[in-house]
Amino acid sequence: MIRLTRLLKWILKAAIFFALFAFALNNQHDATVHLLFGHQWRGPMMLIVLAAFALGVVVGVLGMLPGWWKRPAPAARSAPPTAVANAAPVATSTGAATRADSSSLTSPPHGI
């Protein structure tokens, strides 16, 4: 079953490639892109479509960069929990649950 799905994926990829290749071959006539201040760029339609696609990819990646930089590294996300977080709560004489570990005294009272 896995081999069949792998084969179907390759067939789909080949069909998409050949469809795009046929699109490129059918659109080789010259086209004009009118820019600002009377400038214009003439070139094959295939090249203009490819340039527009590449420009869209670049703008999309640049728009995603701030989110990627703010995300913590995978090693920091998968860090093992500390011993304080794993310590069992112990009831005190006031009835409030506290950690059995003495290092919990250095943590802030609000639990952050």
Image (cartoon, helix red, strand yellow):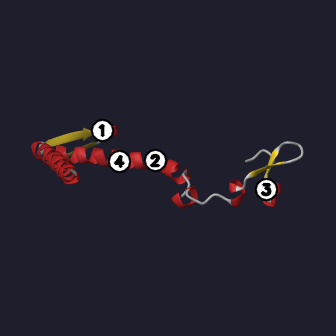
Between the C-alphas of marks 2 and 3, the distance is 44 Å
Q: Which dot, 2 or 1, sits closer to the camera?
A: 2
Q: Which dot, 1 or 4, sits closer to the camera?
A: 4
Which residue is the site of mark 4?
A: 57
Q: Are there few (<14), some (14-19), or many (20+) residues within 10 Å of tag 2?
A: few
Between the C-alphas of marks 1 and 4, the distance is 27 Å
* Mark found first going from the N terminus, 4 or 3: 4
Q: State the residue in front, 71 or 57.
A: 71
Question: Is residue 38 something that shows in the picture?
Answer: yes
Instruction: Tell me whether the residue at label 1 lies in contact with that at label 4, contact meaning CB atoms closer than 8 angstroms.
Output: no
Q: Are there few (<14), some (14-19), or many (20+) residues within 10 Å of tag 4?
A: few
Numbered circles on residues, count: 4
* Mark found first going from the N terminus, 2 or 1: 1
Which residue is the site of mark 2?
A: 64
Between the C-alphas of marks 4 and 2, the distance is 11 Å
| Residue 103, label in figure | none
Residue 53, picture quadrant: top left
Q: Relative to residue 31, is residue 5 depicted above or below?
A: below
Q: Which dot, 1 or 3, sits closer to the camera?
A: 3
Say whether residue 17 is left or right of residue 81.
left
* Mark found first going from the N terminus, 1 or 4: 1
- Residue 99 point in image, percent of width and height: 78, 53
| Residue 38, label in figure | 1
Residue 75, picture quadrant: bottom right
Which residue is the site of mark 3?
A: 100
* Mark found first going from the N terminus, 2 or 3: 2
Q: Amino acid at mark 3?
A: Ala
Between the C-alphas of marks 2 and 1, the distance is 33 Å
Q: Residue at x 24, y 47 (%)?
A: 50
- Residue 100 point in image, percent of width and height: 79, 56
